[in-house]
Amino acid sequence: MSDKQDSGFEIQGSGNKKEPDAVAGDLLSPAPALPTNAQSWNLEPDTGSPPVTRHSSFVTGFRQRYWPVVTLAIIGINVVVFLLLTYAGGLTNTDVLLDFGASFSPYFHRGEYWRLVMPMFLHVGWLHLLGNSYALFILGPILERVYGAGRFSLLYVAAGVGSSALSMSRSLNVAAGASGAIFGIAGAMLVAGYMHRDIIPPRWGRAFGAGIVPFVVLMLILGFSEKGIDKWGHVGGLLTGGVLAAFIPPPKHGLALQFGDERPSQAIIVLPVLVVGLAMVSTAQHYAISRDVTRLLQQGVRLRLAHQDAKALERFQDAARRSPRDERPHMLMGAVYLREQQFDKAIQEYSQAVQLSPGAPEAQLALGVAYRMQGDLGKAQRAFEAALGKNPATADGQRLLADLYADQKLFAEAVQHYKQALQIEPQNAESHNNLAWLYATCDDPKWRDPHAALEHARQAVELTQWKKAGFIDTLAEANFASGSYQEAVRIQVLALQLDSRDPELQEHMLRYRKAAGG
């Protein structure tokens, strides 16, 4: 599948430069008139300016600092998960990001329901994490102080789930990030400000309702205008937070609690904690199985490149047994059978992959190629239309077709479709990269063109700002094909800096160093 889209679950901080403690200010405005026994409550007199780090508590009778425990806990979880993801290579490897639970519609529809929950704890870069953490630290304490830890937790997790649900219903991209849930906070503040104004303490009223509208409008505009942002995730979180806030009012505050009323129960926090806990346990179990399967698939791919198809099939079949719902072993088995011109077996494997990954275009396109090579042009056309629609003239569609033809060593068809992809979208980095790899490594001397490989590989790494290890590896391979062995080593060092644990990159480096005499 194509490389990951920056999920877009990223929010830049608002222009408000207020200090965090000022955001988490006192909920209770000084009462205009106090009972005669006010002194027995040990209340400090109103000084005319609200306290910043101290917070009134009419229940306990003394001033105490309020800590937004849930907000801080969420930020802490995000940081821990980010460090684990970074260590595992998920910032540069889409498969690892998916194994950590990023949202992806085809996988969700095959029963991986934890993908509704996990994306709100995943981030694809330090800026992504810091931007969302800042926005959460600004907005989270406000809503948590007004709603309480329990209801706030419910709103936040439910908004994150709604964000992922709408994203996966409207997009086939891989997505991750907390900003859908953060939009849920904004949606709850917007609706509560209008529907529950009488319950919200007066000093916080300006942050609710109309006060949050500029933030919402600005962030929505940015989401819809910038490429790579998951706008549907933002909308889903906003709508979910707003709808829930309409039915879940904040608990009573202030004087309502002075005359014997019980403080609101926080027991509802058990529900979001249970949902998140189950999702993380399911993801951990899936990760362990998927990494084992990935190792088998990588072994099979190496055996296939060494023309040991029988042993490669054994690895793929073992992987399919260990993970029956994973479409990848069936895709690879289909490719082996197709290259051996065992069309019926190839079609069977690709059909199984389509069933396991509904909505993903790769399996449908592979099935179409198999039908076309078998000579059944009608079924091939229907498979292509199922993947790309009636008009397949899209850059990604042409690139996917080219990838399939290149895998079957049908180089003329592959080059044709890569060029069509670049005619449609000249700045398509993945098409440049894959065409460069074909020109650098093609078995057929007729299609081997190191000079063209260098040209397309340079464009790919420049378009991606040297941030994709695989594209940098292609540039190193193009230099190797051109005989520039020292340059290949130098460039491969950059690829390994981004993904030092990738065995394929390590193998390439050994080959380059050997050729360079190192």
Image: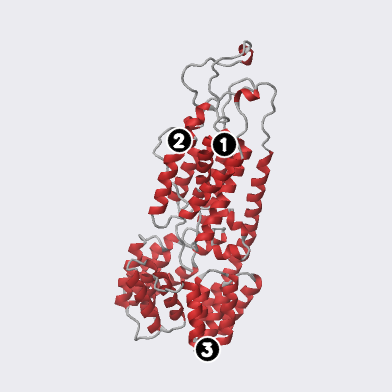
Q: Quadrant of the C terminus?
A: bottom left
Q: Give the percent coordinates (x, y) of residue 41.
A: 63, 16
**Residue at numbered disc 2:** 211
Q: Callout 3: 10 Å neighbours few (<14), some, many (20+)?
A: some
Judged by depth in the image, the label closer to the viewer, 2 or 3, is 2
Residue placed under numbered mark 3 in the picture: 341
Few, some or many residues within 10 Å of mark 2 (<14, 14–19, 20+):
some
Would you place residue 405 above or below residue 28 in this image? Answer: below
Say which amino acid is labelled 2.
Gly
* Residue 306 in view: no
Residue 144 tag number: 1
Closer to viewer: mark 1 or mark 3: 1
Along the viewing direction, whichever of 267 and 394 lies nearer the viewer: 394
Q: Amino acid at mark 3?
A: Gln
Q: Quadrant of residue 242?
A: top right
Q: Which mark is residue 157?
A: none
Task: Kindly report the distance in space between the C-alpha atoms of the residues bearing marks 2 and 3.
Answer: 65 Å
Q: Nearer the viewer, residue 381 or 305?
A: 381
Image quadrant where residue 268 sits: top right
Q: Nearer the viewer, residue 481 or 436?
A: 436
Dot 1 amino acid type: Glu
From the viewer's perspective, tell me whether residue 120 is left or right of residue 434.
right
Residue at the (60%, 61%) spot, across then down:
287
> How far apart in space, not on screen, are marks 2 and 1 (Cα)?
17 Å
